Structures are given as structure tokens and as C-alpha cells.
Amino acid sequence: MRETEDKQLDSRYKRNLGRDFNYLSREFARRLMEKSVARGHKGLKLNWDTVFLNLNFRDGSRLVDLAQVNGLTKQAMSQIVADIEKQGYITKQDDPSDGRARKLKLTTKGKKLVQDSLEAYEELEQECEALVGREKLDTLKEILSELVTARRNTSS
Amino acid sequence: MRETEDKQLDSRYKRNLGRDFNYLSREFARRLMEKSVARGHKGLKLNWDTVFLNLNFRDGSRLVDLAQVNGLTKQAMSQIVADIEKQGYITKQDDPSDGRARKLKLTTKGKKLVQDSLEAYEELEQECEALVGREKLDTLKEILSELVTARRNTSS
DNA sequence: GGTATTTGGTCAAGTTTGCTTTACTATATT
DNA sequence: AATATAGTAAAGCAAACTTGACCAAATACC
């Protein structure tokens, strides 16, 4: 590594697509948390996404299914769910079609959280629009969505 | 939340810019780790980025400075550094300008890791190019970079 | 110039988080 | 009747920190 190469290497290494994804991912998560707190939700945790992003809002979901999707043991999933349940965002209902099973469903408070999160996200998107403009933001969303869809299909 | 609204809400909630950033961030990190392992580097950890992304490759960096940048205690930073040092990627040199201080510098192995990571990253970028094409990838990089720069300036 | 305080760094112990492992109950399936 | 599956309960564990106590060199103060 010669002296003259250092600065080039430095910037190529420290600032690239992957770093940008990482920065924005964290930044979005942090700001969304802030905005959710501002809407009256306390004690939210990042790992709650394992539930909220995979919960069937209409019919509810079973614990084992969530565990499987997330690659966690059902015991681990159970702890996360217990946490969310304790804060009143979801409840367990007996599954009429299986006496062993229970369906996790959003409570009214849970539905409020989902809607508030969505609202918070849309605010955040507007902040981004203010920074780069609507056109670029739309382009970004489109390409990103395409990339994610393509990668999801190849890696599975 | 009426029945008919559910599906709409579902997709808007579960798939957006923030989720895409998160997915790609994790995916990139995972694949880069894989590729680094393939190049002979074992025992790498995600939190090593606190060092590698802030280390001055030319002059080295002091522990406290890294701690401050990352918002960690110097003791926490010290543990991360000890970990990296034990694997032989960095060394500590006495700082001639300050008898208390020591400069963290990349070893030859450390420089190799940086270069291998960069190589791995470029491979990954080419995989993305294969999925969406060069033009879209370049557009993505450009807009993303602009967004990150803009956000960095506003939040500080 | 000598004392007091701050600063860079280390060592060791304690804490929290987010899991896994082991062990168990109750219902379904074969 | 035997086995598999849904879920619970509790203990253990590793990672990634923090806290507290310390040393030595630098700087500030009088």
C-alpha cells in the first residue's frame, strides 16, 4: 500500500453502496423509533420486527410459523412475543382449528402502532424528498425495489 | 382497520424504503463476510467496523478518538481493538508526540483485509449489476450517495 | 518549579440483550 | 398406543457493552 494510494483506498473502502445502505438503514430505524415514541409508543424494540413484519394482520399467525420464517427457535420467538404482549400490542387467541395452537393477533393498540409507524415512515420519506427531490426519490424507490426483489429471488 | 383495507396496509407497512435499506444492508454484510472468509479471513466481527471505518490508514488513530466517533466508552473500544489486535490485523505503536498515547495501525495482514474486503465488495456490486443493469446501478449509487451526504449534513 | 488536575490507556467485574438448551404439558396424527 | 407438533417455563450462555478503580504522562495553576 503506497502512500499515494492511501487516500483513494480510504474513500473507496469507507464509502460505498454497502456502507450507504447500512447508514440509511440505521438512520431510518432510529428516526422511526423517535417518531413512534413521539406518538406515545414506549418500549419498542428492533427485534419486534420479527413479529410485525410477518404477522398476518387479517387472520393472525401462529408462533411456530413466525419462528420458522425468522430462523429462530419457538422459545426465542415466544420471548419476543411475550414482550410485545406485555406491552399490549398483541394477544393470543385459541385457534378453533387446532386445540394446541394459538393465533397471535394485533390488539387495537397494536393496530394503532402499525398505523402510527406508517404515518411516521411517510413523514420520513417526505424529509428525504425535501433533500433530493421527488423525482430522484421515486427513482431510488423503484430501483431499490427492483434490486431487492431480484436478490430475494436469486438467494432463495 | 376494515377488512378491505388490510391488504393495502399490509404491503405498505411491510415493504418500503426503510425495509429495503435494512434488507440490503444485512444482505451486503452477510455476503461480504462470506467472501472475506473465502479469502482466508476468519473470526471477523461486525463491530470491527467501528475501527476499520474510522482508522486513519496513513497515520494511525488513537483509541479515545475512535471511541468518541463511535459513541462508545474507551473501555469498550479497547475490547474491540484487543480483539482485532489478537487476530493480527492491527498493532499499537507508541505515539512520539504524546507519551501516554498509542497509535493504532494496520499490520500487513490488516492491509490485506482491507484490500480483500474492497475486492469482495466490487464482486458484490457486479452481482447487483447483473440483476438490474449498469445504468440503474450507477443511478442508484449516485442518488443514494446524495441522500446520505444530505442527511449527514442535516443531522449533525 | 512544584503541586493539582486532566487525559490516554488498562484491568477486572458486573449488566443487559437476545438468543439456545433442556425439560415439560397438552393436543393431534398415525 | 406411539409419535409428532404447538406452546410454555426456566436455566444457561455469549456478545457487547458499562462501571469503577487504577497508572502514567501531559497540562494548568499558583
Image: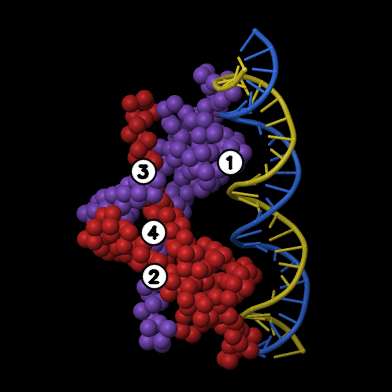
Chain colours: A red, B purple, C blue, D yellow
Give yes or no for contact between labels 3 and 1 (Cβ–Cβ under 8 Å).
no
Q: Are the two marked residues, 4 and 3, in contact with CB atoms closer than 8 angstroms?
A: no
Image quadrant assignment for residue C4: top right
Q: Chain of mark 4?
A: B
Residue denoted by label 1: B73
Identify the element where label 1 is drawn: loop
> Do we see residue B128 in this rendering?
yes
What's the chain of the residue with tag 1?
A: B
Q: Earlier in the sequence, mark 2 or mark 3?
A: 3
Of the two numbered discs 4 and 2 in the rendering, the one whose residue sits closer to the viewer: 2
Under circle 3, the secondary element is loop
Identify the residue at image location x=24%, y=58%.
Answer: A133
Point 36% across, 43% down: residue: A15
Q: CA distance from mark 1 to mark 2?
A: 35 Å
Q: Which residue is mark 3?
A: A15
Q: CA distance from mark 3 to mark 1?
A: 25 Å
Marked residue chain, label 3: A
| Amino acid bearing label 2 | Glu
Q: Earlier in the sequence, mark 4 or mark 1?
A: 4
User: Image height check: is D10 above or below B75?
Assistant: below
Mark drawn on residue A119: 2
Residue A83, position as x, y percentages in the image: 61, 70
Circles 2, 3 touching at the beta carbon (< 8 Å)? no
* In front of the other: A137 or B92: A137
x and y, in percent, of residue A26 in the image: 44, 55
Mark 4 is surrounded, within 10 Å at the Cα level, by few (under 14), some (14 to 19) or many (20 or more) other residues, namely many
Name which residue type carries label 3. Answer: Arg
